[in-house]
Image: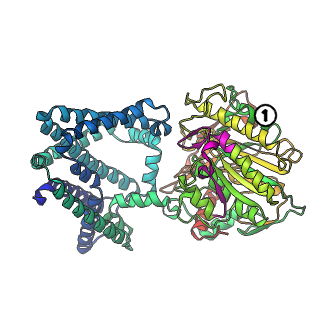
Amino acid sequence: MFLQKIKPFLYLGIFYLTISLVLRMIFIFHPITTADFSFFEVVKILLMGVVNDSLVFVLTCPFLALYFLFLSDSKYQKPYGYIILGLLLLFFLYILLIPNNIFKQYGGSVAEIALTFIGIKILFFSLMLFLPEKRIKIRNILYFITIFLYVMLIIFNAVSEYFFYNEFGLRYNFIAVDYLIYTNEVIGNIMESYPVVPLFLGIFAVAAVFTVYIYRKTKTELLDLPNLKQKLILLISFCVLVGISIVGLNFTTKLKSENVFEEEIQANGLPKFYWAFTHNELDYFQFYPVMNQQQADNTFLSQYSPPVLNRNIESGKPELKKNVVLISIESLSADFMEHYGNTQKITPFLDSLADRSLLFTNLYATGNRTVRGLEALTLCIPPTAGESIIKRENNKNKFTTGSVFKSKGYDVKFLYGGYSYFDNMKDFYEGNGYGIVDRNNFKPEEITFANVWGVADEDMAKKAIQTMNAEAKSGKPFFNHWMTVSNHRPFTYPNGKIDIPGDAKSREGGVKYTDYSLRKFFEMAKKQSWYANTVFVIIADHCASSAGDMELPMDKYRIPAMIFSEEFIEPQKFTQTMSQIDVMPTLFGLLNFNYHSKFLGQDVFTKEFQPKAYVATYQDLGFIKDNYLTIISPLKKIKQYTLQQQKNNLSPEFNIYYDENYLKPDSQNKKLIEQTVAAYQSTSYWLKKNKLNR
């Protein structure tokens, strides 16, 4: 009986192992596989491959197991069927009618997807409840669809692995994860690069043929459903198999080979994808252009005085122990501000503050995600391939902005209106000596509005004032890094605060409400005793969007940044090209700090400063200098563009739009390519060797 009931798993398993075996044979004889294998090595690769594939298949079956577990006729009997249908209808109405439900808070199409899924579930459940004579037929249709989805995903994954190996000579790695993150760009690239329509029609056709075969061989198992006891035995047996598979994969994935191709071909792509997703790294030395490490270090360090990684920064003037408030503003592109040509008047406060501040007019974000901006402002280092260091395992005990302040006796905190476990921020900041103030610190009466990202910026502003007042009473200077949240999809905020309704869900509304909240923060701060002795650094974490016609469009990385302090900072504009990583070293220079430094950003007011900026995605690593943009990418690709500012009515320091003109390899600036490789290679090497730790 039990063997009969697992027939669908057996047929799907055999199909998966067969597809994987064929794929593995293709890899062995693929032109990109430059290694030669003996007969016994081929046998070993195939045997290890079967073991890996079998373990992986078991781990992909929980959804199918749950599907069979919930197959039952008893749930349609009175009164259970009507109770279940009623609960489904209530859930549907909750998503449809409650304006701030959990799905709508996530924004995008999440609510529509959830509504569609529950709607389909209600439809089929109702049909099976009210048409018992059609129940077997309807169940067969759903079973066919379930098998078809499994078969199609197996084939689709095999095709994806083939194309990935065809390009990189490897199974999945962080680049594959990157493809999921940049869905729009990747789909566009695929549409241009491959015959997508014939390819997908072929996948559907093959999937349909094998689905019909498996369906016909196994559909009789739906006529006699197992009872509760039998389901329990099957479930326990499956859980045991899952446990064995997890232990087995933990062993087989750690087996290494001197031959990279042997190691990659015998592996299964899905565990490697999972590893890449959880480790968030892309090995620079495997995928990017490299030079001699000593040469790279010397080239990169030549910009500093002295030209070494561990440097003593000495001011020669008395240190100023002023309080510092660093405000990272979510998704604030430069082109939202009137200074940069925006005519919507959505940042009236920030525009007015900019005229009273040290304004960095030509500053670039290092990346296009919040964690990348936080990394740049906290570690002051160029971005590295893969995910931000904040989300990696080895993210603690780093040399940080906070560690410099702590060495000066400051109280150091990270403030965030959401739950700071998101994006691993809590782990990173606590692991580097910061105190945390986040949504967990709010009393219910302190929250006037919140969505899935956190409390409204206005509520966080009040909590920030409360926190700073408590710090000021201790007699110690404080450094607080506040990350805003309201300028984030779904762009919801309290009504009645600005002239754009809080439920309009508009990007402009999110920007304007954040600007309004910052005005309220400064109005409250100005009334506090510590205000006169405080320096405020206001900067975006990244732009609202990074999509463009080029790999790294200049206007999609340009962000506003300013340092403000009444009676201390003289209003002025700094117009040279600079990076997010230069902001905090510049602030330390303004405070005349003497400190031991491992920062790779520079004080822009020193004579050693070289105008430049680092911009990156998860893959493409860019370097802006001397009106050139140099980009290095996986497969050791190098591209270079000349930058020519477009003509418009804006003054040059506020004109963010550039034409990026591609240079052929024989016309490229070799010195800048060398500096680009040196910067990214050295940063990656020092992180790997923990040389950027405290």
The answer to whether 454 appears left or right of 414 in the picture is left
In x, y percent, where is residue 577? 73, 46
Indicate the quadrant where residue 131 lies.
Answer: top left
Q: Is residue 304 magenta?
A: no
Q: Is residue 608 visible?
A: no
The percent position of residue 554, horizontal first and vertical second, equals 62, 41
> What scheme was used to colour the molecule?
rainbow
Residue depicted at 17% across the width and 58% down the height: 229
Q: Is residue 297 above or below residue 675?
A: below
584 displayed left or right of 81: right
Please state which amino acid type lies under the numbered disc 1. Answer: Ser
Depth check: give the residue in front, 419 or 109: 419
Q: What stretch of residues is rendered in magenta?
A: 432-461
Labels in figure, total: 1
Q: Residue furthest front?
A: 79
Where 535 sits versus 121, above or below?
below
The residue indicated by pointer 1 is 352
What secondary structure is marked by label 1?
helix
In percent of width and height, residue 260 lies at: 39, 68
Q: Is residue 435 magenta?
A: yes
| 193 vs 274: above or below | above
